[in-house]
Image: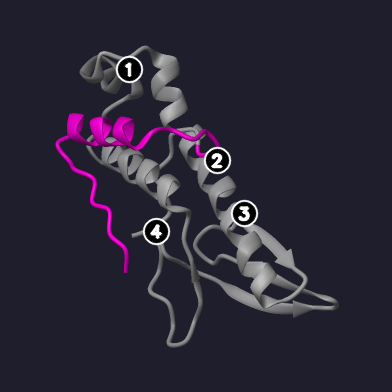
Amino acid sequence: MFDYPVILKPDGETVLVIFPDVPEALTFGADEDDALLQAVDALETALSFYVNARKPLPVPSKPKRGQRTVRPSALESAKLGVYQAMTEQGIKKTELARRLGWHMPQVDRLFDLHHASRLDQIEAAARALGRHLEVRVA
């Protein structure tokens, strides 16, 4: 769902990672594996800018044949899915808080990509938006 294609460019002693769909996400690593590992954090940080600014998330383009992709961790992907559903429906955080019977700081933490929210909280928020959470191992 949030698989973003990356461009890996050798840059001297490092490998630069560029996200064409998320220009705010830019990072590097000692080698390709390290660069891809660093890219997860860069992507999550950049997507948090969109959430904090209450902007729609960038849509990942289709990767070219053989092009690598990077996605946020599972917990962050679930949070982003709830955020995306909320923005698609035009629902504000205050309305989500009302539907859940939560205080605003609880909703704010739910969308903080660096906060370890509980999965049951994310499921509750998805249900409040008429959605459900699917977890699978592929």
Q: Amino acid at mark 4?
A: Phe
Q: Secondary structure at mark 3?
A: helix
**Up-down relation of residue 57 to residue 113 (above or below):** below
Residue drawn 74% across and 80% down?
A: 10
Label at residue 2: 4
Chain part drawn in magenta: 113-138
Residue drawn 85% across and 76% down?
A: 13
Q: Earlier in the sequence, mark 4 or mark 1?
A: 4
User: What residue did someone put label 1 on?
Assistant: 94
Exactly how many numbered labels are in the figure?
Answer: 4
Q: Nearer the viewer, mark 3 or mark 1?
A: 3
Residue drawn 51% across and 77% down?
A: 68
User: What residue did someone put label 3 on?
Assistant: 42
Q: Amino acid at mark 2?
A: Phe
Please provide percent x and percent y for residue 72: 48, 55
Q: Is residue 105 left or right of residue 133?
A: right
Question: How much space separates mark 3 and mark 4, taking CA atoms?
Answer: 14 Å
